[in-house]
Amino acid sequence: MAAGRAFFCAPSSIGATARRLAFASPPARPLASAPHRRVRGRCCASISSSSDASPPAPPPYVLTTPLYYVNAPPHMGSAYTTIAADAVARFQRLLEKRVIFITGTDEHGEKIATSAEASGRNPKEHCDIISNSYKMLWADLDIEYDKFIRTTDPKHEAVVNDFYSRVLSSGDIYRADYEGLYCVSCEEYKDEKELGENNCCPVHLKPCVPRKEDNYFFALSKYQHKLEELLTSNPNFVRPSHRLHEVEGWIKSGLRDFSISRASVEWGIPVPNDTKQTIYVWFDALLGYLSASLDDGEQASLQQAVDRGWPASLHLIGKDILRFHAIYWPAMLMSAGISVPDAVFGHGFLTKDGMKMGKSLGNTLEPKDLVGRFGADAVRYFFLREVEFGNDGDYSEERFINTVNAHLANTIGNLLNRTLGLLKKNCNSTLAFDSIAAADGNSFKNNVENLVDKAKGHYENLSLTSACETVLEIGNLGNLYIDEQAPWSCFKQGGEIAEKAAKDLVIILETMRIIAIALSPITPSLSLRIYTQLGFTEDQFRTLRWDDTKWGALKAGQAMMDPKPIFAKIETEVEEKDQASPKEGKGGKKKARSKGLVEA
């Protein structure tokens, strides 16, 4: 379900007469024995009016990434989506929401079978290896998901079969012939007018092959007006707004029915009523958002999946698969009598040095390599800070190094390091005042609190770049304050001036504590290192809530850790050579790497 996945639509006139399925179909039935209604954006069973009934549990915050296609190992695009999703999930947990963060892999289809054969493995072996590579990368990137679904899981197949039967019962599946030029890499039939010379696919630059199939189709055109009504009544269903305009344009141009089966593809879930065909990967994979909620080994059903917390609060996807999530998916759910998700957010693409990334250009960006060289915090921070969420964004190594060194090593890391150094030298690493008393009558505290509220609003609006900028602004405020107050000089003067200097150190350390919480959705490991240096335990960090950003947690007599740099400044080989041999001329190849936890 990642970039490159595609579909094919039935033409306005199908080659052979469409044949409505003649076999008996059970009548449509409700999805639950009790009526459903929307409560705070969720679908839940109606609540008893009895006065002694306990209040309903708050609905979960269900967040999903795409289910990534396993024809190849994970790339930076899929890593970017998942980093962003993890940041959103961590923020929602800070708000004390019951979060269900879903990710996983899409493992069926012709392209998977082809990739497996090329690697000398059977499809299941291939899927096992690639799916595991996603899990390993997510661990390297500090991704804390709640559910990882694979579309080859037995529970998923059960949900797909139930869903297919339900849509069939709604009268929205029919059989028809289709003939056209097919791109195996896109898994899509193409119009000749969009193809290049020799009928080459414009995306993969490979010739499309003639193919004729007898398939099953989903009656998407039937839901034209319902989808128009959905977007009119809920303009936040598709975000950001320019993506909404794209979807509105697609719908306005007229919706065509699309094929939901393949006769020539063996690697997939068999169509329940026709085992000679397999279910088209998109009609299969989207249902992973539902089947993910089920536990392995339990008797799986569509209804159980719905009851576990559907609908999703937010689908995070790349803009290339927006059509599937904003048009096909809600129409499918409507057909099955299931609530549509609350929102779909389509982010942009990543480029490298201003160019589209590709193996043929030799400019791919491997997330595993980036994490190995610079660490998860640096990778997470750069892409969430420098790529405005919802728009395209560019990576260059020089910009990467400059950004993370300036923001994480210098602005944040150095502020903590030098403040703890002053505390150790002048106060035996122990706070002389609690943070409320230290900031009494000081406008600095109010400025920090205002910025914290601003950062919260940005997180809530999925403005992750702005959230990073606002937290960094708190750090800049702290650096400016300590430079202006110059406590290192005040301590030398003794008396009330030295007492004021001791208060200033408490104020900065309380600011660092707040920064650690506010930045934790973006850089969780860095935030943990900050928090433990302030004398707290990892267990205390794990139980933090956004409300803990309120000023006043540091207490008089609290012991701080000895200063130790919290972020590895990224050095280049040229810089290291210059530092080691200052008389030698500057030259040689510039190669960046993390140098360990060195002082910025």
Image (cartoon, rainbow, N blue to C red):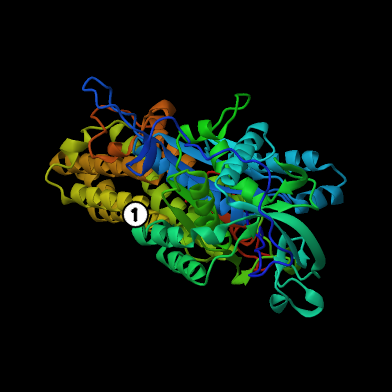
How dense is the environment of label 1, judged by Cα within 10 Å: few (below 14), some, or many (20 and up)?
some
The residue nearer to you, when weighing 242 against 81, is: 242
Task: Judge whether residue 1 can be spotted in this image.
Answer: no
**Residue drawn at the location 23% of the way across and 47% of the way down:** 449
**Residue drawn at the location 53% of the way across and 69% of the way down:** 254
Badge 1 marks a residue whose secondary structure is helix
The residue nearer to you, when weighing 121 against 191, is: 191
Q: Which residue is mark 1?
A: 458
Above/below status of 578 relative to 287 = below
Question: How far across and down, in percent of the image, does residue 426 sit?
Answer: 29, 37
Above/below status of 206 relative to 259 = below
- What kind of residue is marked 1? His
Question: How far across and down, in percent of the image, does residue 544 sit?
Answer: 36, 33
479 horizontally vs 1: left or right: left
Task: Judge whether residue 268 can be spotted in this image.
Answer: yes
Question: How far across and down, in percent of the image, does residue 457 sit?
Answer: 30, 52
**Residue drawn at the location 63% of the way across and 49% of the way down:** 283
463 horizontally vs 214: left or right: left
The outermost residue toward the right is 120
